[in-house]
Amino acid sequence: MSETRYALNGMVCTVDHLASAAGVAMLDRGGNAVDAAIAANAVLAVTAPHMCGLGGDLFALVHDGTVSALNASGRAGSGADPARLRAEGADRMPHLYDIRSVPVPGCADGWLALHERYARLPLAGLLAPAIRLAAEGFPASPLLAPGGEFIGSLPGAGDFAAARRAGDVIRRPGVARALTSLAEGGRAAFYQGEFGRGLLELGGGEYTEEDLARPNADWVEPLSVEVFGHQIWTVPPNSQGYLLLLALEILAGFGPPADPADPRWAHLLVEAARAAGHDRLDVLHETAVAPLGTAAARRALVDPDRRSPLPDAPAGAGDTTYLCVVDGDGMGVSLIQSNASGFGSLLFEPGTGINLHNRGIGFSLTPGHPAEYGPGRRPPHTLCPALVTRPDGTLRTVLGTMGGDAQPQILLQLVTRLLAHGQTPGEAIGAPRWALGSGTGFDTWRSVPVVEVEEGAPWADGLRERGHPVETVEWGSNFGHAHLIDLLPSGVLAGAADPRALIGAALGR
């Protein structure tokens, strides 16, 4: 079980105690939840490059009386050419070491959009903790250190060569320069400065100056459904967040068993996730309309007692970071930021050493597919932050997780535990999980998966009896780093950081 932390005047949950501390420091200085979220994410962009960074994308939900959604995901460059990839023999996007899987990163644009609309404190002050850690050094985490020797051998990634074991000090002077440029000169200093020039050179025609001049952050209409007496919110396509909402609607029609330890509980959630997501590969693209009106029809496909003969929706592991903040005034931020997989593409902008995501792996290479790789297009995204409001519209919960394609499946379990079963944040976050797993990374929605069950979970035999292929997997392996802050009726904040993250922290004030 994860420990539930309580606070009265604000709370920050992230995967790294250094980032959580930076967020709380902004609250102490009079900043709001958005100020704290930007500061925390900036620190993670320095200390957690194996999960996120300035070379990745960002989505966020903000509640300040109403719910707003931000899509800061990047677009493929003007040189994107699917026919060339097909001519090379590819039937899907390259995964690593290929600039064509690197849309223009949207993270910095996301920070700027959040700051412009909501922040109280100057951007330079919000980025100052991250700049200091990048320039002076930070201790490598237990999750970052094991890859340091290999990553440090890649072009542009020499900063990481110093990491051999947890606690070894890493300095990232190029990232400090990039953050300073953003703080002092705004968007142009970053996207047309050292980082932008290096990206153009590395792209070799994949991007133009106009591509980098185009902002990648858009305020969009959030999606929501009503289940378990609450409204559940997420971001719309190109995010896969609708899968969470659709699965919740399917599940609510059955009603989950009273005891989450009952194998039928896991069976119904697994089947709801499969029914919601079996056609994701065909229907998710940047202009898609989320099929939330199909819950009843999809529920009819589910056998409440046996595994249904549905096409399957396997989950790919992903490396992402999720953070959430609620301030003393009740403003909440649910923010997720990612490189897609691990360090991303394993390409590094040579001047700053910023590692570049590979979110372009979500594109299709099928001619005419609505998510086909092409100039200016956004790929389908796994990132899906979530937020819960009460019937009167007030904030109840901010929550989210890393976990690649499994994000909606993990959130389905957390929301059900929290709202249907009344579990505390620590109980919900620390409980064993299941995920639909293919074992093939981001090779999404293509093969028949097993139900991966985290060791210690009570469902394996019962799922097998219901026809599910099941594999017990080591605790923490592919089950996300989830964080959650719940605003109790008393006004007290109750939060939990995922122990699977090893150094995560829910800090309050």
Image (cartoon, rainbow, N blue to C red):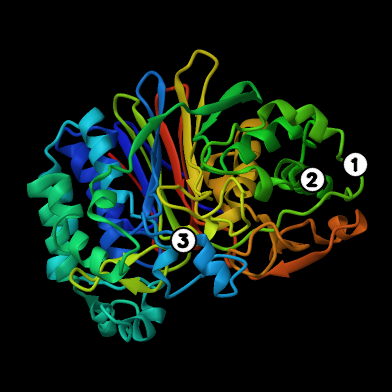
Secondary element at tag 1 = loop
Q: Amino acid at mark 1?
A: Asp
Q: Which residue shows up at 16% across the image and 68% down it?
A: 174
Q: Viewed as shown, does residue 82 lie left or right of 105? A: right
Of 484 and 350, the residue lying toward us: 350
Q: Which residue shows up at 30% across the image and 24% down it?
A: 329
Of 409 and 72, the residue lying toward us: 72
Residue 407 position, x and y percent, is 57, 50
Secondary element at tag 3 = loop
Question: Which residue is disc 3 drawn over?
Answer: 81
Task: Name the residue at the top extreme.
Answer: 392
Q: Are marks 2 and 1 in contact (CB under 8 Å)?
A: yes
Q: Quadrant of residue 30?
A: top left
Q: Amino acid at mark 2?
A: Glu
The residues tagged by marks 2 and 3 sit, at their Cα atoms, a distance apart of 38 Å
Question: Which residue is disc 2 drawn over?
Answer: 271
Q: Are marks 1 and 3 in contact (CB under 8 Å)?
A: no
Q: Is residue 18 visible?
A: no
Question: Which residue is disc 1 drawn over?
Answer: 303
